[in-house]
Amino acid sequence: MTLDSMFSSGTEKMEKTIAQMKKEFASIRTGRANPMILDKVLVEYYGAPTPLRQLSQVSVQDGTTLVIAPYDKTILKDVEKALVKADLGINPNSDGIVVRLIFPPLTTDKRKEICKDVKKVCEESKVAIRNIRRDLADELKKLEKSENLSEDMVKDNQDKIQKLTDKYIKIADDVSAEKEKEVLTV
């Protein structure tokens, strides 16, 4: 492995960590209807757990209501069961044709609780980024031995690894702060 490939691999892994964090943030409830919270909901369909969003059309109505219209109307009860089982904190309402999820306004306490979850997800991402830094440092040590790199070159690359880590830690903090702001906005 060369220094360039080591850094591109590390950068790619850190990018994936940030992308995963953003994906997790998308599934955190903010008081507004967001179809992304249904990403983890699985419906029992012909004996196989199937993602709800593959089985139905999901639309946002008036900002606080999700309307779920299954393509196959015979699975309406299964969709309701899956939504209750997913424990989203919202009870599904069915009219026999579509299922509605009405998002109640969040209380201040609930918003603070959600912010704690956001911070936890951010901290997990930062730990993952630091683990990638450690792996890069280990890789640099291996390269130092195998290619007889000079002390200056090793030191420069250690600084480069730290700068890369700091950059992605800052991105994680910024994304987290943005999500907290979104959660706390009434």
Image: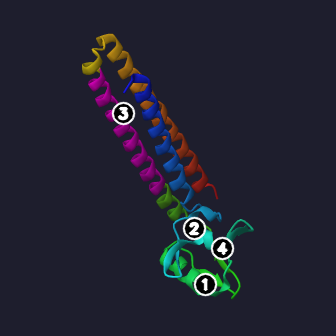
Where are the magenta residues, as a range? Answer: 116-143
Report the residue marked by disc 2: 38
Task: Give yes or no for residue 63 being in the magenta stretch.
Answer: no
CA separation in Å, label 4 and label 2: 11 Å
Q: Which residue is mark 4?
A: 56
Quarter in which the N terminus is drawn: top left
**Amino acid identity at mark 1:** Ile
Secondary structure of residue under mark 2: helix
Q: Is 150 or 107 nearer to us in this picture?
A: 150
The residue at which mark 3 appears reads as: 133
Q: Quadrant of residue 32?
A: bottom right
| Disc nearest the viewer among 4 and 2 | 4
How many neighbours does mark 2 have within 10 angstroms: few (below 14), some (14-19), or many (20 or more)? some
Res 132 seen here: yes
Residue 75: numbered disc: 1
Asked which quadrant contains residue 175, the reply is top right
Distance between the Cα atoms at labels 3 and 2? 33 Å
Say whether disc 1 or disc 3 marks the residue closer to the N-terminus.
Answer: 1
- Evaluate if marks 1 and 3 touch, with contact meaning CB atoms under 8 Å apart: no
Q: Between tags 3 and 4, which lies in front?
A: 4
Task: Decide which of tag 3 and tag 4 comes sooner along the chain.
Answer: 4
Residue 132 in the image: above or below residue 65: above
By secondary structure, the bulk of the magenta-drawn segment is best described as helix
23 to 50, vertically: above or below: above
The residue at 60%/80% (across/down) is 92
